[in-house]
Image: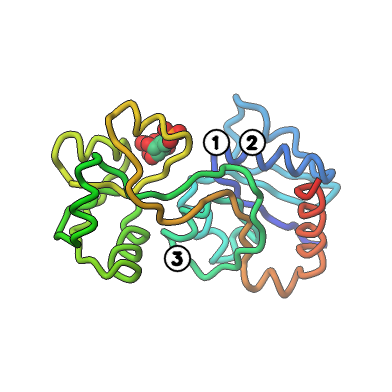
Amino acid sequence: MRYLTFALGKGRLANKTLELFEKIGITCEEIRDKDTRKLIFVNEELKLRFFLAKGPDVPTYVEYGAADIGIVGKDTILEEGRNIYEVLDLGFGKCRMCVCGPEAAAELLKHHELIRVATKYPKIAKDYFYNKKHQTVEIIKLNGSIELAPIVGLSEVIVDIVETGSTLRENGLTVLEEVCPLSARMVVNQVSMKMEQERILKLIADLRSVLAE
Ligand code: PRP
């Protein structure tokens, strides 16, 4: 039996994933050691390997087959646009991709004005404004603290993730439009899905049944 390799998005997502995997009898003790500098972790008994990667790199590892399976946010899947199968919604990491800004920006959206949109997700923003709303906008790519943009006058609105809404509230911003709901998803390499179909389908079925509990 060959190893099945998992790429997990670093951080909260990975922790939640490991908790979920434990419920279906998949454990990996050494990955939980916070001080370790190891990059790859093995469960010899089940012939599984795990590694942690930056979220946006997970679909890349999976597309190229360096990982058979990935766990990553829907936002990253949409933004990266890789050729991979999305097979399961894991139900955690729930949040929304939204167009946000000051209340006053609602008018600009309504009248399809040529506005500036700051975002960490230029592909998602472009797809939403160009293909769904048919509104021409200028997209400005940022790498974090996106809420700053409308406050300091870099853009009229932002496209960003909203979870509790407290970042928006504390900065005088609000949700203006919802782009799509988000959560953690399991993705699979297209060749692995054929070559390791039995093991992967069993894994999906096991996860489905604990998720339904
Ligand atoms: C994310 C997102 C928002 C915030 C939303 O940022 O970009 O800023 O969380 O959460 P809330 O609705 O619960 O306030 P993150 O903390 O990942 O950092 P970033 O700004 O560097 O992207």
Left or right for 36, reference 98: right
Residue at mark 3: 81
What residue lies at 18% left-to-right and 46% top-to-bottom?
Answer: 155
User: What is the crowding at mark 3: few (fewer than 14 residues within 10 Å), some, or many (at least 20)?
Assistant: few
Residue type beneath disc 2: Asn
Task: Kindly state the secondary structure of the residue where label 1 is placed.
Answer: loop
Residue 172 versus residue 75 in the image, above or below: above
- Residue 37 horizontal/vertical position (percent): 57, 32
Task: Kindly state the secondary structure of the residue where label 2 is placed.
Answer: helix
**Mark nearer the N terminus (3 vs 1):** 1
- Residue 71 horizontal/vertical position (percent): 61, 51
Left or right for 207, reference 57: right
CB under 8 Å between discs 1 and 2: yes
User: What is the crowding at mark 1: few (fewer than 14 residues within 10 Å), some, or many (at least 20)?
Assistant: few
Residue at mark 1: 11
Residue type beneath disc 3: Gly
Residue 190 versus residue 40 in the image, above or below: below
What residue lies at 24% left-to-right and 35% top-to-bottom?
Answer: 148
**Mark nearer the N terminus (3 vs 2):** 2
Residue 15 got which mark?
Answer: 2
CB under 8 Å between discs 3 and 1: no
Separation of disc 1 and disc 2 at Cα?
A: 7 Å
User: What is the crowding at mark 2: few (fewer than 14 residues within 10 Å), some, or many (at least 20)?
Assistant: some
